[in-house]
Amino acid sequence: MYQIKKIYSVINKLPKQLQIRNKSNKIFRKKYILLTFTTVFIMLLILLYIIPLPTTQYKGINSFSNINGEFINIDNYIGFAKLHITTENKITHAETITYVHGFGGSSFSWRNNIEYFTKAGYNVLLIDLKGFGVTQKTLDTKYDHISQAEYIFKILNHYNINKTHLVGHSMGGNISVHFALKYPNKIKSLTLVAPALVTENLIINNIGKLLLIPPFTQIYRQIITRTINMENISNFLKYNYANPEFVTNETILGYFLPLDIEDWDLALLGTLRDATENILPTDYIQQLQNHTFPIQIIWGEYDKIIPLTNGFKLNTQIRKATFRIIPKAGHLPMEEKPSEFNELMTIFLNKAK
């Protein structure tokens, strides 16, 4: 009888012992999974820093001394610009047109507009914005659009230009508006070419600050330096043009050139980091309306980056602006349809004198 009770007691305790063992196993499995995940994560981080970035083909900015322009020291930042003097000798005090390129562009974006206007009696100033073209590539400078406007102001002063006809494309349009609001006395006229105006802080603008966390910075660098290549630049340009057949090898190489400069990806990261500071004042439309300088808006009919509907809307807001549409042009009308673009600019500039 005693033996039967003992066996019964052991049987009763068995489920509790099994439950304890199961709990121990679950805890062990969780710890094992956590340990495995941590180990893999650490190994990936180590790999990110062990795998070299594709830097062997990169050059310093000094390697581009043969580029048509000059390097300018602006507050210990190496900028780049070129002042093309008018070929019309009769004009002693020529007016200046200053061109401001868009995101991913450079002074190269205005190659089809220089000779036309220097022959027409204008001086033409081309600027590579900070972080773009063949300027210095670093994280240790400010890339927000107000800082870019201040950089343009200092370049104008470098060339002793008191007033200018300012022409800004896409991102350069937003920078040009910041410039016009900050330095209205420097503006002779303002032309906005498919401007990418920033009026609110988008969620994507906060990505840059996240990427500054060291592991994410390295992930960003590993990905970006391998995905932005000649083929993708070509595809992007063809998307910007209404007619992709107009994208030549010269165009592709011109836009790819800045990617030959060491740490170009850090300059891009800096641009993303400071994107939250690009927002225009809420009353920027009213401020533009109040200033005396004339304003022109130019848009490509088939712009897929910033659709033409944005142009119509902006035209209703800036009531004093002249609004022009270039037929069969995309986001880069000054490149794709230079003759039409230059003609519209000439008509507007003649009225602005």
Image (spheres, grey):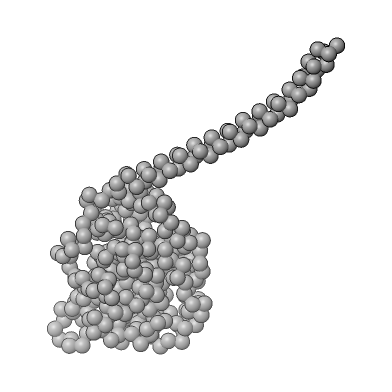
Q: Quadrant of the N terminus?
A: top right
Looking at the image, the residue that sits furthest to the right is 1
Q: Quadrant of the C terminus?
A: bottom left
Q: Is residue 158 left or right of residue 318?
A: left
Is 3 in front, or is 261?
A: 3
Residue at position x 35%, y 87% from top?
185
x%, y% of residue 333?
Answer: 34, 65
Can residue 189 be seen here? Answer: yes
Residue at position x 37%, y 44% from top?
46
x%, y% of residue 332?
Answer: 34, 63
Is 163 in front, or is 113?
A: 163
Is 238 in front, or is 198?
A: 198
x%, y% of residue 143?
Answer: 37, 68
Is 300 in front, or is 96?
A: 96
Residue at position x 29%, y 58% from top?
263
Q: Is residue 32 above or below residue 179?
A: above
Q: Is residue 12 above or below residue 310?
A: above
